[in-house]
Image (cartoon, helix red, strand yellow):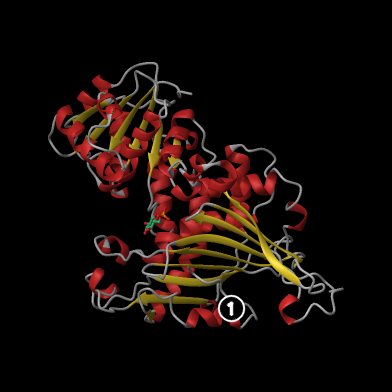
Amino acid sequence: IPVEDFDLVIFGATGDLARRKILPGLYRRFVSGQMPDGAQIIGAARTDQDDAAFQAETRAAIIEFGKVTEGDADLDRFLKHLHYVAIDAKGEGGWKELKSKMREGVVHAFYFSVAPSLFGDIAERLAKHDIADDDSRIVVEKPFGRDLESARALNKVLSQHFDEQQIYRIDHYLGKETVQNLMAVRFANILFEPLWNAQYIDHVQITVAETVGVGGRGSYYDNSGAIRDMVQNHMMQLLCLIAMEPPYHFDPDAVRDEKLKVIRALEPVAPTEIVRGQYQANGEPGYLEDAENPQSRTESYIAMKVRVSNWRWQGTPFYLRTGKKLRARTSEIAITFKEPPHSIFEDAGAAGEPKANELIIRLQPNEGMDLKVMIKEPGPGGMRLVQVPLDMTFADALGPDAADVTDAYERLIMDVIRGNQTLFMRGDEVEAAWAWTDPIIQAWDEGKARPEPYDPGSSGPDEALGLMHRDGRRWREIR
Ligand code: BG6
């Protein structure tokens, strides 16, 4: 079903994110019939080029990143929707031309795929040249600040020209299929919610492991580290969706109010409950070379124990870990329930003892869920118990098309056009998240400690094991 007719302006249209994600994502929405016939995508960047050059560049990007073949018939039709304006974000060049290309009476969306230092300049010029109005939407990318102070400053600058209802702060993890499924599982079933609290859940593990290093984007990454790059935003959002109270409705502010309450309930994390790591050289360049900073104390791995201080979660820790150059690319949330209070199967034997139920939500790969339950091992060997997964791999349950999950970006861009902010972060949420991470980062800066080294292809530094062993628990394997 096509969305409302729109003009989408992409500032930074020649940049990496536009080439890798935004333009290929729009192409996929076009192929699926969601783009109205009149829709315009207007690239805006500093490079001086015409529509044809932008279209050629986009064609190459879609072929490279969108898994599309050269002769694809839809591609030419899609490229006709593309226009280009050379624009000077800090000056006056190009703004009049941009205005002349925009149509009246359609949705206007402006995607700021540029450095945050340009947000204010662009917002100001959109207002000054009367290009944006009260119904326009703006989309801003991460990093949304690097601490509370800078995030506040960004919110302030944007709010001078746009209302909160017009601002779409992207966290692409919220656009992932399984992440939304988390809400469906929690709030569309009676099964889980009664058990979803400290009385029945022993602990939660959230893992986002990557195999890639930071080579190629070292200068950005070295100023961020895993805490700013992954924890303050993506991991925090996952934590919120697991920990939040049921919103009264699946409505943008209802959902975001509940997430905000979780962030505000996070306890400060003691330095002893955090392990930072940095991958070393091992045949291939280590972090220090990738970051081109031999003195760097930035972490490429972090593991931490987090507590949500409210009635529901008192006593249930959340263990978070994320890192680069790890053994496998795996993102999952594992919820470990408590063991049954009493076992009636005395003769079950060591191997057959009842084990705790687990719910594993796999973000990638093999999007889906597993619910681990105990059953009797089939056969005549007596009442021996065995744990089996109730496997809900989407591809198996719903057919191969379900495995071809919509990329997070394409879904989120269409939500902007539809005017649905549910999967976007609100300004107060982002600020609260920084307010929680700021003291952690400050303590590191003051302590000047080096992160623990770990081997590429491992599960991270050994020290991280201790974080759970101390509590009599263990990390799930990364594979
Ligand atoms: C980005 C981070 O926001 O998310 C990257 O800047 C990271 O460092 C990426 O690799 C992970 O996203 P995904 O969708 O590949 O899990």
Residue labelled with disc 1? 468
Image vertical order of residue 469 relative to residue 30, above or below: below
Image vertical order of residue 39 relative to residue 22, above or below: above
Q: Could you say which is closer to the camera, residue 194 or residue 373? A: 373
What kind of residue is marked 1?
Met
Q: Name the residue at 25% across, 40% down.
A: 63
- Residue extending farthest front: 380
Q: In which quarter of the image is ligand 1?
A: bottom left
Please state the horizontal and vertical placement of residue 364, each as a whole percent of the image. Answer: 48, 55
Quadrant in the rendering for residue 121: top left
- Residue extending farthest right: 344
Q: Name the residue at 29% across, 42% down.
A: 18
Image vertical order of residue 478 relative to residue 64, above or below: below
Quadrant in the rendering for residue 417: top left
Q: Name the residue at 18% across, 28% down.
A: 51
Please state the horizontal and vertical placement of residue 131, each as a whole percent of the image. Answer: 31, 25
Please state the horizontal and vertical placement of residue 246, each as a whole percent of the image. Answer: 69, 47
Please state the horizontal and vertical placement of residue 238, each as a whole percent of the image. Answer: 55, 55
